[in-house]
Image: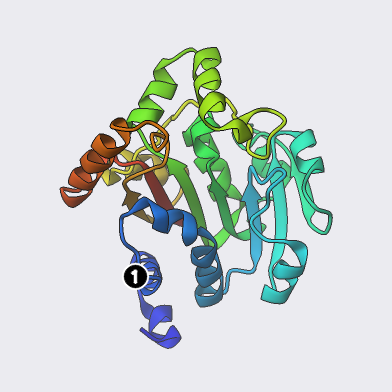
Amino acid sequence: MTDALLANASPAADIREIVAGLGYPSHWHWCWENYKPTIIELSRRRGLRRHLEIGAGRDPLFQPMEAAALGLDITLNDISARELALAPSGYGKMECDITSPRASDILGRGKYDLAYCRMVMEHVPDVPAMWRNVADVLAPGGVALSFFPTLYALPYALNRLMPERMSRFILESLFPERKPEGGDPKFPAYYDHCFSSESRIMPMLRQAGFSDAVVLPFWGYAYFWKIPGLKQLDAAFNRFAERRDWRAVSSFAYVIATR
């Protein structure tokens, strides 16, 4: 589909065509490898230049020189001043809780064309409030993309049910980089509205002010790769669930919503 035809397509059809052009399969490797390419293609094809990265903290998606080369004006948001301080200079930085009643005023109503976050939504205790604020800060025709782990995949269901101290100990034992002093520290997770089923996501998005959305599910993860036997059994189950489109046990999702 050409850019001229995209201008006349519905937003959801447009987004599905863009993702299909990147070779979307529902295997989990794709969602990690193509998160940035998806943002770049959405920006290029729909002319989305003013970006808000939510929960960007120490690890923003684009480096300043990269953003400049792509013609992107990026603002970083995080609830933690410490995490924002660890990010490189060269961006606008806005400290606030994305669920706060004041968030849309702090960040700027209608100020952005594209808002996105990765591995943030599971840490938000009030996801409907987050989506309402995201809708408020987007300009008409703006797009939001959230990339998150989904219930009821086994690792996340266990993380949700376990006391935080126990889940932290297990995760940090298997993956030392998830310790507080590591490069990818663990934060408490709530998994509010972390689903890949359209029937569970769309009512909330429409109430928040979005006109349409594309939900892309993915299956698989690496959490059990250090446990022989369980690794193979779990991988086989995920392949089975993927073939049958069992959304209740997907592992990750992209939700791409249009204002």
Residue drawn at 58 percent across, 48 percent down: 136
Quarter where residue 157 is shown: top left
**Residue 188 or 48: which is nearer the viewer?**
188
Type of the residue with mark 1: Ala
Q: Is residue 98 left or right of residue 259?
A: right
Secondary structure of residue under mark 1: helix
Mark 1 closeness class: few <14, some 14–19, many ≥20 residues within 10 Å: few
Q: Where is residue 43 shown, x and y percent of the image?
A: 56, 70
Residue 152 visible in the displayed image: no
Residue located beneath label 1 in the image? 20
Outermost residue to the left: 244
On screen, residue 10 above or below 243: below
Q: Is residue 8 left or right of residue 168?
A: left
Q: Where is residue 201 shown, x and y percent of the image?
A: 35, 42
On screen, residue 184 above or below 218: above
**Image coloring type:** rainbow
Residue drawn at 56 percent across, 48 percent down: 117
Residue 164 visible in the displayed image: yes
On screen, residue 158 above or below 89: above
Q: Where is residue 237 shown, x and y percent of the image?
A: 21, 39
Q: Is residue 17 left or right of residue 177?
A: left
Residue drawn at 32 percent across, 36 percent down: 231
Q: Quadrant of the N terminus?
A: bottom left
Q: Is residue 98 left or right of residue 162?
A: right
Q: Where is residue 119 shown, x and y percent of the image?
A: 53, 42
**Residue 163 or 54: which is nearer the viewer?**
163
On screen, residue 41 above or below 90: below
